[in-house]
Each structure stands twice: as C-alpha cells, then as structure tokens.
Image (tube, helix red, strand yellow):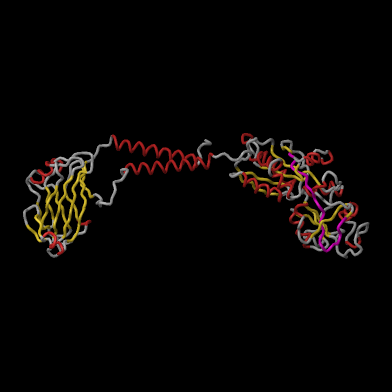
Amino acid sequence: MEWITAENVIAVATALLGVLVSLGAVWIDRFKPQRKRLGYRVQLNTPLHEEADDQDGGVMTLHDGEVLDSAAAGATLVLLRIENDRDLDISIDDYGVAPAEHALRITFGTPAVTVRGVVATVPAGWSSVRDDLDGAPKLGRAGNAVLVPRVALDTGRYFKLLVQLSGPVADRDIKVHGTLAGGSIRRNRSTTPDDQAGRFSPAARTVTVVLTACVVALAAIIVRERTPPPIGCARGSLTVTGSTAFAPVVRAVAEAYEKDCPGATVTVDADGSTAGVRDLADTGARTPRSEGSPAVIALSDGHGPGGHPQLREHMVAVSLFTVVVHDSVPVRSLTLGQLRSLYRGDLARWNRLEGPGLPPDLPDRAVLLVSRDADSGSREVFQRRVLGRNEPANSSRDCSVVDDPEAKVVRCELDSTAQVLATVARLPGAIGYAELGAATGARGVHRVALDGREPVLEELGDSPYPYREIEYAYTWGDPASDSLTASFLAYLARGRGQDVVRAHGHLPCSTPKGLRICGDADTGP
C-alpha cells in the first residue's frame, strides 16, 4: 500500500493520540467516579523569639486553656490548614472510626518534639465545622501529635490549627495520619500571599500540552511533505550516464537543478557514450513494464549505437571538441592531412612533420598518440568528422613505451576525457583530443587549430570547423511527464540549464542558432 510511509504512520498515530487524550479528558471530567480527598498544607512554621515580649506580653492562650510562654526556649509555632479540595463533600462517617475516637493524628517530627498547645480557627458562618471540632472527643494533644475529631467538610471548606511545639520541625516531617472511605489524605502545596491561582487545572494543562504537541507534529509533516515543488520540478533520484566529455556540464546542471528543486537527487556516473547507451538499454529491458521508464538518462556524443528501438533520442546541444598537444611541441595549427598522417602512424617523430604553417624548429621527440577507448563518443566523432576512418589498434598500455614491436608509433587508449588531458600534459611529445570546455584552461597542453580554424562557440554555423557534434540524450521510451527524468531533461535542454550548457562552451539546441545546426542533415550520422 503506497500510503504506508513513515511520515503517514507518524501523522496517523499523532492524530489518534490527540483524539484519545481528548476523549480521556472528557471521560475523567464527566464519567469517572470522583474520589474524596482531604488535603493539608503548612502555612506557617516559625520559631518564637523573645522580641515578642514587648509586643504581646509574651503569653498566648491555646485551645485547652493552658497559658504558655511564647518566648520559651526553642518554641516553634506552626499553622496547619486542613481542607476539602475536591468536588465531593466529606461527612463524619467517611473517616471510618467510632464516634468516640479521633479521626486524624497529626505528628510533628520525632518524639523529642512535643506539642505544648493547639488552637483551631474556623471562618465565620461555618458553625457545623466549629461544632464538630468542639464535640467529643475534643481537639487534643499527645506527645508530638495533635488529635483531631471527625469533622464534616463540604466542598471548599477548611479549618486551621495553630500549634505550639517545644522545638523546631521541618515541613516535610509534619504528617497527617488517618483513613477516608472512598478517598485519600494528601499533602497540598502551601501557597504564599504572592502566589496566584493557576488559570488551568493540572488535567487541563496536560490536555493542552499534548494537543499542542500533536498539532505541531502534524503541521511539520504537512509543511515538509505536502508543500509542492516549484513548477517544472520533480522529486526522487535520477542517474545520468554516458559521455565523459559532457559529464562536467551535466554535473553543473545537476547541482543547479537540485538547488532549484529541493527533494531531487541527480547522480552523474559517466562511463562513455556507447557504454552508457547500452547500460540504459539493459536497465530498461530488466525493468517491469508496470514501473514505466527507469530513472536513467544516457548522454552520447553523436548518435548512440543502433539496435535499441525502445530508446528515445533527444537533441541537447552542439558540442565542440579540440585537438591538444603537450606544451613542448610548438605546433599551433595542423591541416587535416597532417593530423591524419600522424594518426595513421606515418610519422614517428615530430621533426619529420612537414607542411605549411609549421615552425622550423620542431623538436626531435617521439609522437605519442593518446586516444579514447572504443566506447567513447569523442573518439567516434573524431574518427568520423576528422580522420575519415577508424583509428588503428593501440600499441601501448602506458602511453610512453611501445608494447608491440611491429608498431610504428606509440598509441594508447584511455577511459575518460580527464585522463586524456592529464596524460598529454604529463608526456612530452603527446597529442590527443578532448571536449573544448574541458581542454580550455588545462595546464601543460595547448589547443591546435584545424586548417587554421579555431573552435569558437560564437562562430558555430558560420565556420566549417569540423570537430563538432550533437550531444544526444537517450531515455527508455517516453518518460512520464511528471517524472524526474522528464523534468531534468527539460531543464537541461530547454530550461535554466541552458545557461550552464552555454557557460561550458556548448550551444543549446533550443536556441535559434542551435535549432538550425541541430536540424541540419549534415550533423546526422
């Protein structure tokens, strides 16, 4: 099922979590049985000092009528609030003790601390609470504990106990013991006059936080996954193979496309024009028909090999190529006859080269012919448009020493344009050929004009410079119009990629001059 993706699963789970939390909050609020709860909090816990003598005479009367010295050494005063903090009333029968027994036992630390006195305070108008506190058994004390009778507390009602202790006690050591049928007794957080009541209950806060997190998660998924790409763009992965001469151009176009179209990945894996076209044909034949055209484009310098009727041919640009020689050879121009003579193997050394336009001091160096392999489109164009015949077999593996004793000259074959340029630059006396954009600016080599004509992009169509060819792109059948294959091909041949193609020394076929050249029958095979 296509919709089952990681993003969709996360989105559905997040939505369900939000719904379940909302339903749970409603159930707790409306249907879950409420529990009774008796809460208590310490509102005052302070030692008594002798300074009190000057203000109130140093005496205070507590609940049991005993008069105590408020400045007694180590005395501590504690104010404890007992409250019903739930929505259910607490009756005297909820405490689970007999009427003659105390319902609550409040302890203050260790037995070393004793309760010296206790007094209860009740807000005006709550006479029933006061009556319960005054009933039997009365509010009392025993050692370090205060004994509290059964007190009925309606929702929101409370009473306070003012307790004098013989010594200090920590808030955490003040505990209320007892049982409450259908409920619990728990400590509440003590508030100060500066505290403000919360705007939301704990349950409301939890629901708000969870729902907000769900909304943010869903929004993030929607923004990331549902935002459409720019017009003409597509997402996915695409492989471009074939021509190594055109590979630098395609890499630059791929980088521009990925920047303009987030979500697309274009990988350039050049392995030669002929090999690229055959690999595409093999990939297409293995791809199930239900999956459509594979996401592969093969580029070829000139027409690719025949015998693959399923492939579709697309003209992209006019490419210019050039002959290059090592800087040690001061040749700047060759006639087609001279170049053909060199590649036939008629001349083994440069100083044997004769003809018009040559410098008089050609070096006595061996001619080293550096060519491309048989799968290269650059070689195929060189043979067809410059030599007028196929190159002889290679005679050297390292491009500097003859392996075949019957060979007249050193001739080697390399896999890529970059290797040809690097080898010609490394070996004095070497000559080779390469795509114009790659050769321009290469160190250790210089370009050679043919019949006095330089490869100039602006002069295409007006100059008979022979070493040029159409760059073709091949696809398996016609790719879907919304596919990355179709989108990238349009970007390369007709879109913003044209600027990159021109910057690398090629003429896009979609330009007015390019249309004339690409449509010329002379550029055919």
Q: Could you say where residue 202 lies in the image, as x and y percent from the top left?
A: 31, 44
- The residue at 49%/39% (across/down) is 8
- Principal secondary structure, stretch drawn in magenta: strand
Q: Could you say where residue 52 lies in the image, as x and y percent from the top left?
A: 14, 61
Picture layout, residue 88 above or below residue 323: above
- The residue at 16%/45% (across/down) is 123
Q: Could you say where residue 257 lies in the image, as x and y percent from the top left?
A: 64, 45
Q: Nearer the viewer, residue 223 or 266?
A: 223
Picture layout, residue 8 above or below residue 506: above
Residue 24, located in which quarter of the rendered image? top left
Evaluate whether residue 406 shows in this view: no
Does 518 appear in magenta? Answer: no
Picture layout, residue 509 above or below residue 365: above
Evaluate whether residue 413 shows in this view: yes
Q: Count how many numbered circles sit on residues in the image.
A: 0
Residue 293, located in which quarter of the rendered image? top right
Quarter holding the C terminus is: top right
Q: In this view, does 457 lie to the left or right of 178?
A: right
- The residue at 22%/56% (across/down) is 171
| Segment colored magenta | 314-333
* Extreme residue toward the front, this view: 54
Q: Could you say where residue 502 lies in the image, as x and y percent from the top left?
A: 74, 47
Picture layout, residue 114 above or below residue 492: below
Does 321 appear in magenta? Answer: yes
- The residue at 71%/51% (across/down) is 248
Q: Which of 487 and 231 is in front in this view?
A: 231
